[in-house]
Image (cartoon, rainbow, N blue to C red):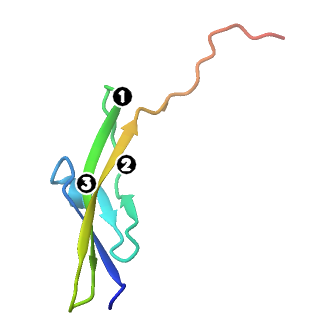
């Protein structure tokens, strides 16, 4: 068990988002979104969470954590509009 690490995820901006919006693979630490991320009209939305890592060694378990911030910027989700006349 020494050297094996378990990852967990806690504490986004909104407590509902912990289980609804994001998931973490407990073995690899890979964070993924479960739903489409939203952005505000202000240009971006920020999601903040804490990633915890704990060694599975039962005799000398150690742990640490880091803060993960995800900024979702506004994307251009509209079809392009051509404003100049075509040139033949």
Q: Position of residue 34 (x, y in %)?
A: 35, 58
Work out how far the residue at label 3 is from the one at label 1, CA to CA, in angstroms: 20 Å
User: Residue pushed farthest front?
Assistant: 60
Residue 40: percent from the left, percent from the top? Answer: 30, 31
Q: Which quadrant of the view contains residue 54?
A: bottom left
Q: Secondary structure at mark 3?
A: strand
On screen, 20 above or below 84? below
Apparent side of residue 58 relative to residue 2 in the rendered image (left or right): left
Q: Residue at the location (28% across, 46% down)?
A: 47
Residue position marked by numbered label 1 in the rendering = 43
Work out which residue is located at the far top of the displayed protein and give it.
85
As drawn, 35 above or below 43:
below
Q: CA distance from mark 3 to mark 2?
A: 17 Å
Query: Please, is residue 25 above or below residue 16 in the view?
Result: below
Could you tell me residue 3's position as x and y percent?
36, 85
Near mark 2 (Cα within 10 A), the count class, few <14, some 14-19 or many ≥20, is few
Pointer 3: what residue?
49
Q: Name the residue beneath numbered marker 2.
A: 36
Q: Earlier in the sequence, mark 3 or mark 1?
A: 1
């Amino acid at each position: 068990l020494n050297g094996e690490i378990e990852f967990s995820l806690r504490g986004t901006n909104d407590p509902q988002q912990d289980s609804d919006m994001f998931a973490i693979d407990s073995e690899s630490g890979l964070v993924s979104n479960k739903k489409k991320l939203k952005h505000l009209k202000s240009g971006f939305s920020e999601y903040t969470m804490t990633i915890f890592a704990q060694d599975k060694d039962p005799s000398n378990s150690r742990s640490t954590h880091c803060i993960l911030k995800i900024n979702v910027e506004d994307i251009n989700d509209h079809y392009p509009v051509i404003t100049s006349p075509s040139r033949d």
